[in-house]
């Protein structure tokens, strides 16, 4: 397991959390249980990332799809539970996808299986989505073959390389609320 990927994720998370006076808050997540919750105030939940010890992995996805996932994928999704975090990569506004609790992690696994199955059916490069963008036809993904972070066009399957790896991606992200 690449500890540099984990450190890059945790460093970005720390930078992101530091922009809040107390903690990030969410109205959408206030009714959903999570080890991330610090407190609930009316219709708002205040949260902090919850470090998963031991880390989770996506071996179920690997077994169902029949491929080995890039090690960075396991680190990205298996290190922590958190709310989704907004950021900016050059001129692209994005929201990093994070699991909120065990149920959300299971849903994430199912969504990854569906995504990878569709790519296999279309004979496309296998990718693991890690962030949404303001453009509903484009996502930020990890190229499972190379470990590169790419902008993926969901319609054409075109992949545009953003960085060589997850570490470079996190280091170039701008905190954005």
Image (cartoon, rainbow, N blue to C red):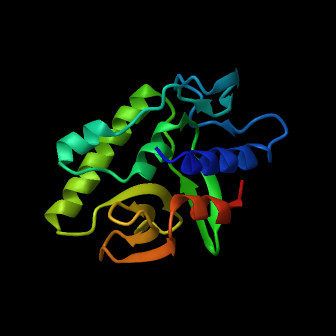
Q: Seen in the image, is 173 located left or right of residue 67?
A: right
Comparing 19 with 77, the one in front is: 77
Image location (x, y in percent) of residue 119: 23, 62
Write down the quadrant of residue 80 in the picture. Answer: top right
The vertical placement of 165 against 35, above or below, is below
Q: Measuring 46% from the left and 54% from the top, which residue is drawn there?
A: 130
Extreme right residue here?
A: 21
Q: Measuring 64% from the left and 25% from the top, which residue is drawn there?
A: 37
Q: Measuring 63% from the left and 36% from the top, which residue is drawn there?
A: 27
Comparing 88 with 166, the one in front is: 166
Comparing 131 with 149, the one in front is: 149
The vertical placement of 177 against 99, above or below, is below
Q: Seen in the image, is 93 located left or right of residue 127?
A: right
The mark tally for this picture is 0
Q: Measuring 63% from the left and 34% from the top, which residue is drawn there?
A: 49
Comparing 45 with 154, the one in front is: 154
Image location (x, y in percent) of residue 77: 46, 42
Image location (x, y in percent) of residue 50: 60, 29
Extreme left residue here?
A: 121
């Amino acid at each position: 397991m690449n500890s540099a990927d984990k450190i890059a994720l945790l460093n970005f998370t720390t930078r992101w959390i530091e922009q809040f006076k107390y903690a990030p808050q969410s109205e959408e997540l206030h009714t959903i249980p999570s080890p991330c919750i610090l407190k609930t105030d009316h219709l708002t939940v205040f949260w902090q990332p919850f470090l998963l010890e031991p880390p989770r992995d996506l071996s179920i996805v690997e077994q169902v799809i029949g491929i080995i996932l890039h090690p960075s994928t396991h680190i990205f999704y298996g290190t922590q539970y958190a709310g989704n975090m907004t950021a900016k990569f050059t001129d692209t506004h994005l929201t990093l996808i994070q699991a909120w609790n065990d149920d959300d992690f299971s849903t994430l696994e199912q969504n990854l299986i569906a995504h990878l199955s569709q790519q296999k059916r279309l004979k496309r490069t296998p990718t693991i989505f890690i962030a949404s963008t303001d453009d509903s036809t484009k996502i930020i993904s990890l190229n499972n073959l190379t470990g590169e972070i790419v902008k993926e066009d969901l319609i054409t399957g075109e992949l545009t390389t953003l960085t060589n790896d997850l570490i470079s991606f996190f280091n170039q992200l701008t905190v954005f609320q």
